[in-house]
Every structure is written in structure tokens, then in C-alpha cells.
Image (spheres, rainbow, N blue to C red):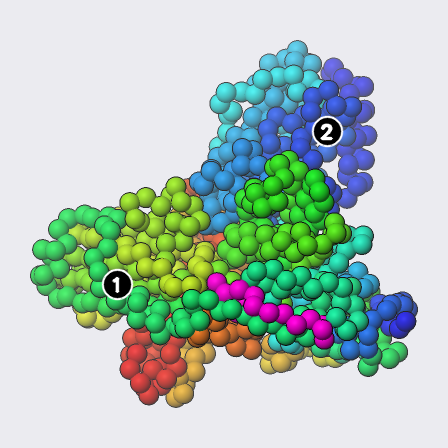
Amino acid sequence: MQRDSASLDVTRRKLLQAAGAGSVLLAFHLPLRAAPAAGEAKPTFAPNAFIRIDESNKVTLVMPQVEMGQGIYTSVAMILAEELDADIAQVALEHAPPSDTLYGNPTFGIQVTGNSNSVRAFWTPLRNAGASARAMLVQAAAQQWKVDPASCSAAKSAVTHAATGRVLAYGALVRDASKLTPPATPQLKDPANFTVIGQPLKRFDTPDKVNGKVVYGIDVMLPGMKFATVALCPVFGGKVGHVDDSAAKQIPGVQKIVVLDDMVAVTGDHMWAAKKGLDALDITWNEGPNGNVSSAEIWADLRAASQKDGVVAKAEGDVAKFLGQGDRLDEAYELPFLAHATMEPLNCTVQLTKDSCEIWTGTQIMSRVQGTVAQLTGLPLDKVTVHNHLIGGGFGRRLEPDMVLTAVRVAQQLDGAPVKVVWTREQDIQHDVYRPVYRDTISASLANGKIQAWKYRVTGSAVIARWLPPAFQKGIDIDAIDGAADIAYDIPNLQIEYVRAEPPAVPTGFWRGVGPNNNVFATECFIDELAKKAGKDPVAFRRDMLGKTPRLKAALDLAAEKSGWGQALPARAGRGVSIQTAFGSFIATVVEAEVDEHGEVRLRRVTAAVDTGIAVNPDTVIAQIQGGLIFGLTAALYGEITIDKGRVQQSNFHDYRMLRIDEAPQIDVHLIKSGEAPGGIGEAGVTASSASLRNALYAATGVPLRRLPIDRAALAGKKNA
Amino acid sequence: MATLKINGESKVFEATEDTPLLWVLRDVLGLTGTKFGCGIAQCGACTVHVDGKPVRSCLLPVGGIGDRAITTIEGIGATPAGASVQKAWLDLEVIQCGYCQSGQIMAAAALLAATPHPDDADIDAAMAGNICRCGTYVRIRDAIKRAAAARAA
């Protein structure tokens, strides 16, 4: 047996050293550097933007998508490691630096984490990146051994030539592999041969989250750092009038009072001093044109707008003709403004000097943050450094750069010292970018117990038009109607319309679950009302119309079975079902709930059957569904932001209520094994929650609620729904 | 200058007596594991132990603490209950974003130290003050039971 003893020795020693260094290395605290240039002292194999391997056999994987709790760092690492045949227990992870070119989300063309599409969008690019690098490493080893690459295999960050027993660790192949050209079409693994993907793997980001070591953006500490907090005009669009700072200046620890046209900030030795200073300011605001905006006006406008014909986004068959035949039903469903209320309040740390700006924050939009800071400061892009952090909740709030821009504007008034700007919870809730109010109206006709015509109109804010203007085409917000256009049911005649209606003054943005939140809610509530009209059981009624969507039918069958659908329940308890294909995952959900005489709701149990295709890290899929359901149920039970006199009326968790552990139901998630490409899962639990809850309450009480949050007085029979 | 006993060590710092412990921990002493969530004792993210009892540090002025022992998330692993909770949290993969979990772990560790075998009602009573926006409640409940069982074994 021939052996390349020298390289084997080196390899083994390096492997042992690497093993001794502990398990997965998290390099999150390190400053980010671009992949080392060729000719640098330390040779590195960096065949693409996602993978770096050095001679010590350290495999570093660069994360194009941000980690905000959804487990994506682990899933991305698993996909890369699978095709790379890297030892998953030994990889190091790094945040990606800002770059649309290297890390742009294939769906959006910019570097963004959202729309539950990290795994979906990067599935093939990451597999290709891993497979390409593996092929080059194998080829490098084969050349050294003068054997056919096909006779070599790779596993655990090493190449083996089985016939001769020779082994070379990836680290020993760094120089040779770097000289090779990547294959044009790398050979991907047959999913049947996956050893990492599909196996439950402990998340890489959680060990430091149990002992206080994790550093979120809000935890950044820099030498000489000042602490600041801000007050924005309580009326949207208003300006600062007059500020009397005489009392604030007397407060120990207060350093500087920054007055800008639309906000006031106070810096201090710590957050408490800054907050006390801010509270002590006597600020007169110029409210501007929005001082009379109210929820009542917004709803009246929205309802009026929903009477108009919309832009037709999808049309099949002849809706006008068939709506006029058979049993017809028309209903409207309304969703309120919502705040994100991430547990980590908005924050950003800035160090701004004459010729550079450094940003420390947690953001879902790395490159956009860099670009907007460059624009604001007039600095060249390469002088703006963004250090991203693990995120204490995104939910869409951190798809906006406002917190960074506000912090930079404060820093512009300081002397170059680093400043950490932290929003109070009150500022965070009252200056959010809100999930818009939506009104979805649906008309349908039934023939022989099935839907023969379906007209669905979404009326609401076009978030896409502001956030990604090139995607706003022909007056259609593709997100707002996404879940309506992508309907799972067999309906021969259908029409989907969109009416753009921007609420006055209130800024609107993406909120976990996005468009499918209103679409799934309205569709699935309406389906239950149609089932009742048809005299059918809600599961049976749906089941008969899922011929073109067999994966959803299978999920429905499983959820019905596991939830005990049809079994007797106590008085005023009920089960409700909803089904969806949102984000490319096929999910059926059954909520079991009961209602007391006051209309108070108790969640008894939730059962979800989930076909998300290949589940990269199955336990993460289950966790996202469990958590997404709670997130959505919270909104359905309690969530509503209201406006009075141009101001948000809610301010903190006492009046913007969250579901708590004593209200949380048992949740059983059943994964359906599948070889299909992965679907999205981070938001699917949210969209699965509200209609199934509402339908359970409908079954329990007979009251057809058509607005969220749920109306307890209506459930108690004290008023109409 | 004031002194507090934190995680078994004496810590000297400068802050007015009305300053909440949360901000002394985070901004003065750099113990950032304790989190700011709401500032009005509604969310529990800032939970620490004072003489073993769970307390919302966002409303606890440092001037009134005296020589009582403070334990934070950075020190809770040194207690048997805290270590068992941390292990159960990882074993059952409770955590998502993790921002609230310092407070959740502190509340759970205090519960187990006082009530070694909590039932669902005990868990509800001890943990209902801690909000988790990621919705990890189902796993928190299971992990507390697992930690209790592990300590009994």
C-alpha cells in the first residue's frame, strides 16, 4: 500500500489540532475581511464567496443571510458542508460583509433576508458552491496522487483514494486547488446520499445564547462610547418646534442634547442618564398636516377604496358569468395595523469621523444600510463599514434602514466618539413601519357543492412600491396578492384584483407572514363560510377541491387525523382548519379553542401537518412552525395598532399585548417526508394561525368574525361580528 | 462610588442611586447578557436574581440593593439549577433569536431552585412575566420539566 506519509502526517496533526480547538467556531466578533487576495502570506482556498479553507484545515463558511432566530446560519452551513463534504462539526461561520454582487439574494437581486426564502433562494447556489469547491479539492488530490479523480472520494474535510488508502486533508490541498479552474457544472449529490441535510443538527448560534455571551447589536461596547436615546415627533411627519433643555442639563450623566428638525436625542454616560435627560426636556412639536389622522378615517378610506375595481392580477375562465349563477356569497375581511415589537428594541452604534463611518447593528439589509449611510454622509461606499450582528428578532422590522440613519444623524452632531443609540420600547412601538391595514373582499358562487367562480380583491398599501420599486409593475403589489393568486383550490373561473390604498401618514412595511397573512386569513375564513353554505364539513369541502394540489391534500388528511377532527368536544369549544401553500410549503393547521361566556378565548391545542419539501434541519422547521403559530396567534388574539390625532395610541407591552406562556397551547407539528426542493418556513406558521383560530371560534360559537384581532364582545353574543 | 455583589464578585461603579440595576449592569459594568426589553417590568428580559429571587432589573434602583447578592445570566451557570436549565435549553433547542432567553433562563432557574418539581401551573405562574416574541413557550415548558427531571436523577 502506497502512502504519502509526509502529507498524511501533516494532515493528521492539523486535524487533531483543529479537533482540539473545540467544535464549531463562531467568528462573529471578528472584524470582517474580504477573502484574502492571491499571494497573501497565508494561502487560502477561496473558490467562491461562501467558502474559505486555510492550510490548518479550517473551513470558514460565509453566511449570505442573517440569523435572527430562524436557524439559517445552521441550515446554510449544512447545505454548504453537505456538498463540500466538509466536517460540519469543525466549520467556522462568518457574517457576510455588505455586497449585492457576492451575497445578493437571488430572488431580489439585493442582499436581503426575508420572505422566508433563504433556503429556497440559496438552495442551488450554495449546493453549487460546495460541490464546485469539493470537485477542485478532489482534483487537486488526484493530480498529486496521479490517479483518476473519479477514483477518489471526499468526506469530513479530506480526500481519500480508497484503492491505496491515501488521505489528504483539505488544508493540505489549499495551494494546488487554488490553481484549478472551477468546474462549469459541478456534480451535485443525489439527495438520497445526503448525510448532513435532513439530519437534526444542534444550532450553532445557541450555546452563547444561554450564558449571556452572545453580542447583539444592542450589546456592542466600544472604548469611549456614549449612550443615546431619541424622541421622534409623536405625530407622523411632524417637526420639532421648541426645546427647553434647562432641566435636562442638570441631570447627572447627561452629556449632550441634540436637536434636529424632526427629532431630539440626548447622549449620556449610560442609557439611564440619556433617558432621564430626554424625559426632562420640554419639547414643543409642530405637528404638521397629520395631527388629525385617525383610525376611523383610515378605515373609512380603505373601505371606500375597496369598492373600486382593482387592477386585475390574474384572470381565468369567466368570473362575471359564473358569479351570476348558483349560490353566491360576498364577504370582506379586515386586518389591522401591527407593530413588529422585536424583543431587541431598535438600536444602532455609530462611529463617524471625517473620512469614515462604522456601523454596528443587526440588519436584514446589509448592503442597503451601507449604501444609505454613504448617501447620507457623502462618504464613499468603501469608507462605510457595517458590522452585522445576530439579531434579537427581525420579523421585517430590520428590513428598514431608519434606525441606522437616525443613529448616524445623531453621530453627525457629536465629536467622532462612538455612540450607541437605543430606542425605548415606547419609541420602538410608536415609530415602527407598520403592517398595513388590509381589506380583502371575496365573492364566490357554488355549484354542486364546489366553488365555480371566485373573485378576490385585495385593498391596501403597496409596500413593494416603496421598498423594491422595480418589482411594482402595472400597479400590482405582488406581495399583497401573492397568497390570493397562488390559490390551491380547483376553481374554474377566478379573478384576482389589487387596489392600492395608502393610509395617510402611517408608514407601512413588511411584517412576518407578509401578503399571505391577509390572503390566507381571508381565503380560509371565507372557505369555511362557503362550506357552511354548501352544508359540508370544512375538511371535506376543502378536500374535494384539492385535485391539483396533492401535497396539500395529504397535509390536510394528516392534520385532520392527528387533530382528532370530527371527534366530540365540549360546548363552546371548536376546531378550525386552514390550509396554505404560502412560501412554497404545504401546510394544514387545526386549532382547537374554547370560548367562555365573556368571549374570552382559551387555546387548547394546535396541530400542524407540514410538507416543506426537503427539511434541511428538521427540528428547525418544527421550531419555526411552533414559533410562527404563536406569533400569528398573538396578533390574532391581541394585535392592533390604532391611530388618534396622528399618533400611535399603543406604547409598550401593557397596551400592545403579547401572548404569554400561560396562554400557549400544546402544539404538535408533523413533518411530511418529501424529496421535493425545500420550501420556505420562517413565516409559514404565522400565516397558518389566524384563520384556523377564527374557524375554531366559528365552530365553537357560530359567530363568523371577519376582522382581526378577534372581537370578544361579538364572540360573547353582545354585538354583531 | 457604590459597590454591588454581582456573581460572587464585588463590583465598584459610579451611578446615582436611582439608576436601575439594568443600566449599571449593561452600560457601566459591561455585563450585557441582561437585556433591555420594555423598561416597565412587562417583558422579563432584564430578569436577574437578588438573593436567589427573580427580579426585574429595569425597575430596581441600585441604591436600594445594599449587600444582597446579585446573580446575572453570566453567573447563573455556577448554580445547580441554572446549569440544569442551560443544559435543558440546549438539549431541547429552545432558543430562536435568543434575546429574551437570558430572562427566561433566570426565571426558570429561580423556579427550579424554589420548586424542584414544578407542575404546569407552577410554570405558568413563574414564567408568565417573560415574553418571547419567537414563541418558544412550548419548548420552555418542556425544558423546565426536563431540567427538573435531570436534577432529580
In this rendering, do the residues under marks 2 and 1 share a single chain?
A: yes
Name the image quarter holding residue A566: bottom left
Residue A241 on the magenta span:
yes
What kind of residue is marked 2?
Asp
Of all residues shown, which one is farthest toward the top? A146
Residue density around tag 1, few if under 14, some if 14–19, many if 20 or more, within 10 Å:
many
Residue ID at (52%, 47%): A113
What is the tally of numbered marks visible in this picture? 2
Q: For residue A669: magenta? A: no
Q: Is residue A46 above or below residue A701?
A: above
What residue would you read off at disc 2?
Answer: A54
Q: State which chain disc 2 sits on.
A: A
Chain ID of residue with mark 1: A
Quarter of the C terminus of chain B within the rendering = bottom right
Q: Earlier in the sequence, mark 2 or mark 1?
A: 2
Task: Find the magenta span and give its range.
Answer: A233-248
At 86% from the left edge and 69% from the top edge, which residue is drawn? B14
The reply to whether residue A593 is in sight is: yes
Residue A103: image x %, image y %?
55, 37
**Vertical side of A217 occupied by A370: above or below:** above
Query: Which residue type carries mark 1?
Result: Ser
Task: Left or right? Give the position of A647 relative to B123.
Answer: left
Q: Does residue A607 appear left or right of residue B38 in this picture?
A: left
Q: Is residue A553 visible?
A: no
Q: Which mark is residue A306?
A: 1
Q: Residue A640 placed where, x, y %?
A: 44, 71
Q: Position of residue B151 (x, y in %)?
A: 74, 69
Helix, strand or loop status at disc 2: strand
